[in-house]
């Protein structure tokens, strides 16, 4: 089973086929990609969902 797992599931194409990989980058470009991604997210604002349950007094 280990051999079958390694041949069928331990490669990047398996994850890419299922949409689990956003991007494949060259290791030398990691710093540049990380900086660019964090700069993009700097101004992101996500609204929190409305609370479904309050905190009633006991």
Image (cartoon, rainbow, N blue to C red):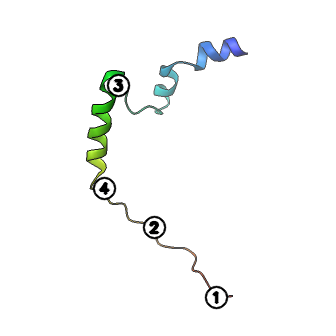
| Label 4 close to label 1 by CB (< 8 Å) | no
Number of other residues with Cα within 10 Å of mark 4, as a class: few under 14, some 14 to 19, many 20 or more: few
CA gap between label 2 and label 1 equals 22 Å
Query: If you read the primary sequence from the N terminus, does the residue marked by circle 4 or circle 1 appear first?
Result: 4
Q: Nearer the viewer, mark 2 or mark 1?
A: 1
* Mark 2 nearby-residue class (10 Å; few <14, some 14–19, many ≥20): few
Q: Earlier in the sequence, mark 1 or mark 3?
A: 3
Label 3 crowd (10 A; few <14 / some 14-19 / many >=20)? few
Percent coordinates x, y for residue 33 in the rendering: 30, 33
Distance (Cα) linking label 1 and label 3:
52 Å
Instruction: Give the percent coordinates (x, y) of residue 41.
Output: 30, 49
- Tell me what residue is drawn at x 50 percent, y 30 percent: 18
Determine which residue is flagged by label 3.
25
Q: Which residue is mark 4?
A: 44
**Quarter of the N terminus within the rendering:** top right
Q: Report the residue marked by disc 2.
A: 49
- Give the mark nearest the N terminus, 2 or 1: 2
Q: Position of residue 9 (x, y in %)?
A: 59, 20
Residue found farthest to the right: 1
Q: Residue farthest to the bottom? A: 57
Q: CA distance from mark 3 to mark 4?
A: 23 Å
Q: Residue 57, which numbered label? A: 1
Q: Nearer the viewer, residue 12 or 43?
A: 43
CB under 8 Å between discs 3 and 2: no
Locate the C terminus by quadrant: bottom right
Residue located at (27% from left, 32% from top): 32
The Cα atoms of the two marked residues, 2 and 4, are separated by 16 Å
């Amino acid at each position: 089973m280990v051999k079958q797992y390694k041949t069928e599931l331990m490669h990047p194409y398996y994850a890419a086929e299922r949409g689990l990989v956003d991007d494949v980058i060259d290791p030398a470009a990691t710093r540049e990609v990380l900086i660019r991604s964090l700069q993009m997210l700097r101004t992101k604002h996500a609204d929190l969902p409305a609370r479904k349950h309050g905190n009633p007094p006991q």
